[in-house]
């Protein structure tokens, strides 16, 4: 049986995981802190001094988190009781049980990067819910709305294509179906370019029609198993059709 490879972590200097923890996550945290600071007047207008104190508390918690990350401190359990707190803390204990470190504690640069990044977002959420009355505030709302607005042209083009495809799909032969299927797979793949976490919170909107860019982007696909996937899907459809005919002929048990 093949051995499962070790999870990518920040200890692999120069890797995506390393750059995520060293640069990308601190950049996201800095932008979150800046967003809270820019809304200080809004918090005061809505909640008075209590809102300002809540903003200070949230920023303090997030600054502490950023320092823990940048100095590779142990990853600590969540403290605010929420619906998923126990699950997170149990998983943290599991990660610690896998370590060979002398102190047995998970650290930012030595833990699986995906866990670390998800944990970071959960700690951001914790900082906000620990800071009423601004515990409703979405620190990513502005960037999400901005990127969606700036991507409208591409969104409309894709929706128009899909509406047309729905109308004509019954008339497409197998090769045409495969072509459309491959287009949708590639659109799904390249949609990750709009992920705000990958850009560190910088604008990553899709300002061009992605359908017209698919051919130019193909050389950047590192591993392409679309043909194999299509063969599996069509094989499954063929077997289902044969089983249906077999059943109808009275030979199905």
Image (tube, helix red, strand yellow):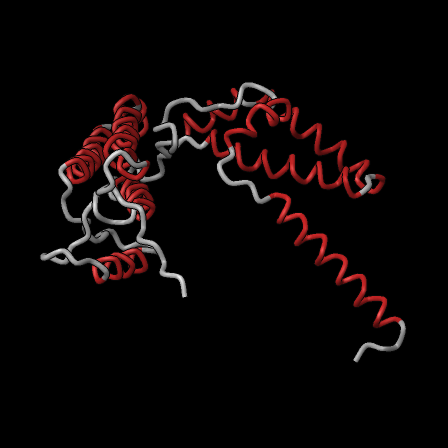
User: Residue 179 or 37: which is nearer the viewer?
Assistant: 179
**Residue 140 versus residue 251 in the image, above or below:** above
Question: Left or right: 45 with respect to 157?
Answer: left
Residue placed furthest toward the bottom: 253
Question: Left or right: 45 with respect to 219?
Answer: left
Residue placed furthest toward the front: 1
User: Residue 21 or 86: which is nearer the viewer?
Assistant: 21
User: Can you say which quadrant of the picture contains the N terminus?
Assistant: bottom left
Q: Quadrant of residue 251?
A: bottom right
User: Can you say which quadrant of the picture contains the C terminus?
Assistant: bottom right
Image coordinates of residue 116 in percent, x first then y, are 28, 45
Image coordinates of residue 57 in percent, x first then y, are 19, 35
Residue placed furthest toward the left: 102
Image coordinates of residue 15 in percent, x first then y, are 30, 36
Residue at screen point 18% across, 48% down: 107
User: Residue 60 or 116: which is nearer the viewer?
Assistant: 116
**Residue 118 versus residue 105 in the image, above or below:** above
Residue at screen point 82% across, 66% down: 244
Q: Is residue 126 visible?
A: no
**Residue 203 versus residue 248 in the image, above or below:** above
User: Residue 186 or 121: which is nearer the viewer?
Assistant: 186
Could you tell me how many numbered marks the image carries?
Answer: 0
Q: Quadrant of residue 108?
A: top left
Q: Quadrant of residue 224?
A: top right
Q: Is residue 46 visible?
A: yes
Question: Left or right: 250 with respect to 15?
Answer: right
Residue at screen point 28% across, 42% down: 120
Residue at screen point 52% across, 20% down: 150
Image coordinates of residue 78 in percent, x first then y, are 23, 52
């Amino acid at each position: 049986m093949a051995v499962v490879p070790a999870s990518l972590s920040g200890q692999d200097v120069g890797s995506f995981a390393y750059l995520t923890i060293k640069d990308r996550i601190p950049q996201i945290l800095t932008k979150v802190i800046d967003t809270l600071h820019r809304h200080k007047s809004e918090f005061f207008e809505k909640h008075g001094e209590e809102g300002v104190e809540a903003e200070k508390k949230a920023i303090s918690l997030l600054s502490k988190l950023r320092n823990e990350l940048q100095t590779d401190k142990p990853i600590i359990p969540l403290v605010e009781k929420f619906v998923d707190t126990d699950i997170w803390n149990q998983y943290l204990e599991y990660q610690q049980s896998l370590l060979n470190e002398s102190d047995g504690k998970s650290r930012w640069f030595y833990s699986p990067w995906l866990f670390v990044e998800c944990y970071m977002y959960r700690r951001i959420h914790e900082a906000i819910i620990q800071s009423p009355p601004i515990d409703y505030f979405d620190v990513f709302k502005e960037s999400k709305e901005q990127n969606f607005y700036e991507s409208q042209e591409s969104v409309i083009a894709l929706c128009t294509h899909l509406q047309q495809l729905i109308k004509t799909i019954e008339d497409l032969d197998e090769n045409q179906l495969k072509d459309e299927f491959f287009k949708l797979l590639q659109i799904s793949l390249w949609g990750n370019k709009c992920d705000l976490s990958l850009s560190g919170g910088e604008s990553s909107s899709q300002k061009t029609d992605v359908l017209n860019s698919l051919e130019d982007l193909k050389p950047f696909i590192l591993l392409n198993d679309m043909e194999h996937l299509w063969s599996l899907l069509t094989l499954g459809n063929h077997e289902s059709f044969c089983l249906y005919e077999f059943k109808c002929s009275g030979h199905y048990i």
